[in-house]
Amino acid sequence: NAGVTQTPKFQVLKTGQSMTLQCAQDMNHNSMYWYRQDPGMGLRLIYYSASEGTTDKGEVPNGYNVSRLNKREFSLRLESAAPSQTSVYFCASSESLPGYLARYEQYFGPGTRLTVT
Amino acid sequence: RKEVEQDPGPFNVPEGATVAFNCTYSNSASQSFFWYRQDCRKEPKLLMSVYSSGNEDGRFTAQLNRASQYISLLIRDSKLSDSATYLCVAFTGAGGTSYGKLTFGQGTILTVHP
């Protein structure tokens, strides 16, 4: 049981390049999330997918797109990378259902450290 | 004002000490809370969930004060391995078709020294 996996672990991009960050979970969770973590800013939600087939914007969606490929996989795409997107990106999943308070604990992948020069 | 605020620290304590962190939240509709632990350059991992007034797990105790809108985390008998950043998280908004959202604080850095 690997939990949440992310690839790649590290990436350096030049301004304007594109790339896709991959995330997969094997816990049969409904919901998946993409966060970025910057010093002094805490974790900020970029996009989330409450269930297979749906995606919604989070707090900081500009410059990103997502695809919920199936229940296991949720990818994040940077179409034209900018230095402001230098950050650590975390994918997470949770067993969340609408209207339920319990089991909203999120499980995180190991992160992708992205540098845009 | 940030929705979830924590004292960033750092807190430097000797082994065996008791240390407490506070976290305040501004949205009175927040329904449940979590403490996550994040080691340097690693992913956050769930430490405790707080759904009612509090929770205890071994050396760790979390308390929730809804009237004052704060959550605390108490660590007793600190170990070197407790050195990490502790993230306070508030969950708001589930109901009907809403999935709600999690809001993370910036984190409190704890260093436990010999």
Image (tube, helix red, strand yellow):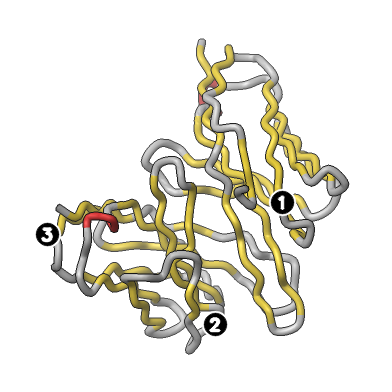
Q: CA distance from mark 1 to mark 3?
A: 39 Å
Rate crowding at label 1 as few (under 14), some (14 to 19) or many (20 or more) other CA atoms within 10 Å: some
Residue B72 location, quadrant? top right
Q: Which residue is mark 3?
A: A14
Q: Secondary structure at mark 2?
A: loop
Q: Secondary structure at mark 3?
A: loop
Q: Amino acid at mark 1?
A: Ser
Q: CA distance from mark 3 to mark 2?
A: 33 Å
Rate crowding at label 3 as few (under 14), some (14 to 19) or many (20 or more) other CA atoms within 10 Å: few
Chain ID at mark 1: B
Q: Residue at x 75, y 35 (%)?
A: B61
For residue B103, the mark is none
Residue A72 location, quadrant? bottom left
Rate crowding at label 2 as few (under 14), some (14 to 19) or many (20 or more) other CA atoms within 10 Å: some
Image-based side of A32 in relation to B100, left or right: left
B87, above or below B15, in the image: below
Q: Position of residue A88 (x, y in %)?
A: 34, 52
A93, above or below A66, in the image: above
Residue A102 visible at all: yes
Q: How many marks?
A: 3
Comparing marks 2 and 1, which lies closer to the viewer?
Answer: 1
Q: Position of residue A115 (x, y in %)?
A: 21, 52
Q: Position of residue B45 (x, y in %)?
A: 53, 48
Q: Which residue is mark 2?
A: A51
Q: Position of residue B34 (x, y in %)?
A: 67, 50
Q: Which residue is mark 1?
A: B26
